[in-house]
Each structure stands twice: as C-alpha cells, then as structure tokens.
Amino acid sequence: MRSMRIVGVLAGGACALALFTSAAEAQPTRDMLSRELEQNMREMRIFLSSNRSLAERLVAGRAAEGVTGVDQETRAITLFRNASADARLRAIALDKLHSAVAADAGLQRDVASVLADRASAAVLREQALDVIEGLSFARPASSLAAGTAGEKLLELLDDPNPAFRLRGMALLMQEDNEAARTRLGEGLLNPTAAAVPPPDAVRLLGAKLVSDVLPLLRQMMTSPPDQATRIEAIRALGRDPESREAIAALLRDPRQPQAVRLQALASLDANLGTPEFIPHARPIVGDESAGDSLRVYAIQSVKYRRGTVAELAEDEFDAVVRAIAASSSASAVLRQVARGYVQARGL
Amino acid sequence: MGVAFSLTNPLNVWKVNGVNAIERSPRFAPDGDPRLKDEPSTLAFAIFEEFRAIEDEPHSLAHGRTAGGGWLGHTGTAVQDPLFFLLHANIDRLWAWWQVEKDRLNPASEESYSLQGSTAAGNCSTLGQAALDTMWPWNGATRPTDRCRPATAPGGVFPAFAPGVFVPPQQPRPYDLIDYRGGASSPGVGGVSYDNVPFK
C-alpha cells in the first residue's frame, strides 16, 4: 500500500507536536519509502519507454507519482513537446512537470500555447490549464497574467468550452485584469455575449468590491436573471454599507425563498458587530415559520460570537433560545443546537 | 458559491473579510487522487537546493488543485480557507521529515539550507528568506523605513514558551529554525517534531 498522499494527510490533520518515533520504528518506514520510490521509478521508466505499448504506458504513467531525477524530467519534457505523440501521453507527461514548468519560462510559453490551441486535444489543454492554475499561486501577475500566459488566458474567454472560459476568467480576475472585469460586466448586461454564467460573473466581480461594479451588483440583487445570481449579489454586497438595509429587508421578507433569506442573514453576519447583528438574528430565531436552516444559522452564529463564558447577563436572545431548547415542537436539530447554545452560555 | 456544510457544522457559519462560506472547488473527487508528488518522491531529494522544489510541488500545486479557482488558489485569499493551515502544517512536516532522513539539520550548511548569508539591501523579492535575515513581523520592520516591508508589523516580538522548551529568538531568522528539534543550538532542551517523523 502506498504511503499517504499529501491531501490525504491534510484531511487527517497529522501535525501533532513533540511525539517522537524511535529509530527502531523508523526503519520499516524507510524500507516502505524505498520500495515505493523504486516502484515509482519503474512506472516512470515504462511510461517514458517508446518500446512499450500505448496501453502499458498510459497505465504506468497514471500510476506514477512523478519524475525522479534530471534524466526522467528531461525525457518527460521531450514527450510533452512532441506534437506527434499521443495527446494522452503528452498530458500525463505534463502532469509530472509542474516544478519544471515553474522554473522554466520557455516551458511556460509552451504550456500556454497548448492551452490556447483549440485544435489540441481537450485532455492536453485541460492539463495545461491545471498546471497554470497551480503556478498562479506562487507566481502571480509578473509571469502569468501579465505575460504570455496572460494573453492566452484572455483568448480562453472566447473558447467554445464553458469550463475553460470560467477557469480562465477566474485566473484573470485573481490578478485584477481590467479586460476580464469589463467582459464580466458586459456579459451581465448582455447575456448573449457572456463568457461565464451570471452567478459566476457576480461572484468574480464581487470578490473585490470596487465602486465601479457596485451599481451593477445592486441591480443583480434587485433584478437578477435567476436566484443563484441574486444570492451571489447579496453575498458580495454585504460589504457595502449602502446595501445593508436592502439585504435586511430580504431577510425579513417571508415571501423570499429560504436560500435568499439565508444568504441575507449570512451577509449581515459577516459584516456586523454582535450588537448590530442580534437585532436581525433574534426575530428569525423566534419565528417558527422561518425554517430550520435560518434559525439554526442564527443561533450558531451568536453562540460563536459570544464564546463559551457567560460574561453577559441573560438577554432576550438567550430567552428565545432557551425556550426552543425546552420545546417539544421544535425539530430535533433545532433543539440540539439550542441546547448547545444554552450549555455554552451557562444559562 | 461556497462549500456547503451540514447545519450543525461550525464551518456552516464561517465568514472572513465580510464574506461568508468558503470558496473552494477541488479538481479531484473527495476520495479521488489529487495527483501530487507523494512522500517517497519528495523525501528522495538529496540537498536543499533540490528539495526546495517542493514549494512548487506539492505546495503550490496543492493550493491550486484544492482551490479550483477558490480562495486557496491565490496568495491574497488563501489564508481565508481553514484548509490553508492543514496544508502548510503538512509541508512543514515533509520538510522536517526530509531533514531527519538526509541529516540536514545544520543551519550553516548549504546542503541543509542553500540561501546562506543575508539578503542584499533593496532586494525585496528574497528579503526574509536568507539564513541570517530577520523575519517580519517579529522584527518590527515597516515602511517607509524599510521599503520592502508592509506598513505595519502586528503582534510584536516572537513569544516566549514555557521554560525548558526550545524557542527561537525574539527576532528569529531562518538560521534559527533549521534545527527545529533544538539539538545543536540548545543542547538538552526539547524542541518539536511530528508524530510520524523518525527521531534518531
């Protein structure tokens, strides 16, 4: 069995301190690591060997964890650059070259060219986009959005593949690309020219709330093309003080769908101090027609805001929650959350 | 839209910088293969100049593939996703493990840490990385006195721990942290390690 992969370890949160493994216990681990490394090198040798069948190479390449050593890296680069090779092999080779691409501007240009070439196989273009997404974390605007890859990403906005358009737009907006921002705004006003769906456009525009986009976002909150777009607009506009009353009105309106009211509550929660938030939360908690998701959210949020120490005198909010905790008509999950609140507050 | 959590999960009410819900769209299934360089390949590097490639893979690639266009994929927003701390704890663990496996705990050796010496004045791109550079924010350096640093340095100097536990100086340098177990620099004083990193 292979040792834990990186994200598998993350999920387990294995980072305890000051618990040492002895030298005797370490040897089996080292043996296992050596075996796995040898296995990986074998798989890479098969993958990179032109004497093997395509099927064998594909299986070995998908199983291999990465290149080991300069020789394997060089051969993987050659395979990726070989336009006459099978696109699946080229994509797998590129998958093993993330560090090499990060260190080599020429290779970055080649990856960007593959990405922009609509005649290239989708599997290869998708891998190119994956590599550029990975690069963008460590190498922002200077070498990507502002460079050759940036130009290619702009070309992606007109790609027939909607997933490519969205991923390209997200990368450009991370770098505050003005052309991308303009395209998003135009797309919301003229859906036939939109590069990405309206909810994604609002989410990306709202990530950095600049004054130029506020009127459009407010329009998307009051007159959206669909509910998902309205929810994203409410989410973004929580940071806009002038929009807060409109958001609070959506929260209070029982005719609004549950999802819209929940986002309104969450937006107020994310932007108001506790004294300002509780007047919005208390009526929701006490409203039996409001639905569990709203009432549970309101209780949980105030619980975490107030912490676990009962420093405050019992107030009206506490009394409402205490009544829910003792109520036989409340749902099980609502009662559970209310009891957790009462316990945390020491009521 | 953000990640959906169950009603009673504390992360259901997650909010940061005025926005609720964590934006994350992993490029792999929850039980799928993230296709990252694994432990054996990472630990196989011989010297730091090779090992430092882990900054790109698995580190940066893990950011990108896990974020899928979300917060974790950009330096300006990555820390808003609580997964950031697990990801970085794991990178620290890999580095610590590699140091033990290859005996790379001597901070004065280029094989342990190739960025020896101090960063030249005005070179903002590597300031704080060279072995003898002091690190922001603990060194208190701010603009405009130091044009390479942010405008504020919150938090003060590095905090003291309980007596008997190795801690870096109040203004730590990378040099002070290479031997994280505290063996060479503080004989007899316990440092830190990780539960599955061999201790020899």
Image (cartoon, helix red, strand yellow):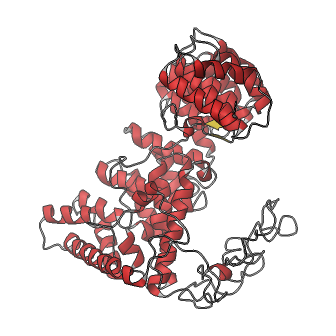
Task: Name the side, left or right, on which A144 lies relative to B119.
Answer: left
Residue A220 screen position, x and y as percent? 61, 22
Numbered-mark total? 0
Vertical arrangement, residue B79 with respect to residue B92, above or below: above
Vertical arrangement, residue B26 with respect to residue B134, above or below: above
Q: Residue furthest right?
A: B145
Q: Residue furthest top?
A: A255
Vertical arrangement, residue A335 with respect to residue A98, above or below: above
Vertical arrangement, residue A10 with respect to residue A261, above or below: below
Name the residue nearer the viewer: A99 or A32.
A32
Name the residue nearer the viewer: A174 or A284.
A284
Name the residue nearer the viewer: A34 or A41.
A34
Q: Quadrant of residue A326?
A: top right
The residue at 57%/26% (across/down) is: A296
Task: Name the side, left or right, on which A132 lies relative to B179.
Answer: left
Task: Name the side, left or right, on which A309 lies relative to A66.
Answer: right
The residue at 36%/74% (across/down) is: B40
Residue A229 visible to an observer of this rendering: no
Name the residue nearer the viewer: B93 or A332.
A332
Residue A327 screen position, x and y as percent? 57, 16
* Quarter occupied by the N terminus of chain A: bottom left
Q: Quadrant of residue A51?
A: bottom left
Residue A22 visible to an observer of this rendering: yes
The residue at 68%/22% (across/down) is: A281
Residue A258 screen position, x and y as percent? 53, 17
* Quarter occupied by the C terminus of chain A: top right
Task: Name the side, left or right, on which A245 lies relative to B26.
Answer: right
Residue A234 screen position, x and y as percent? 63, 26
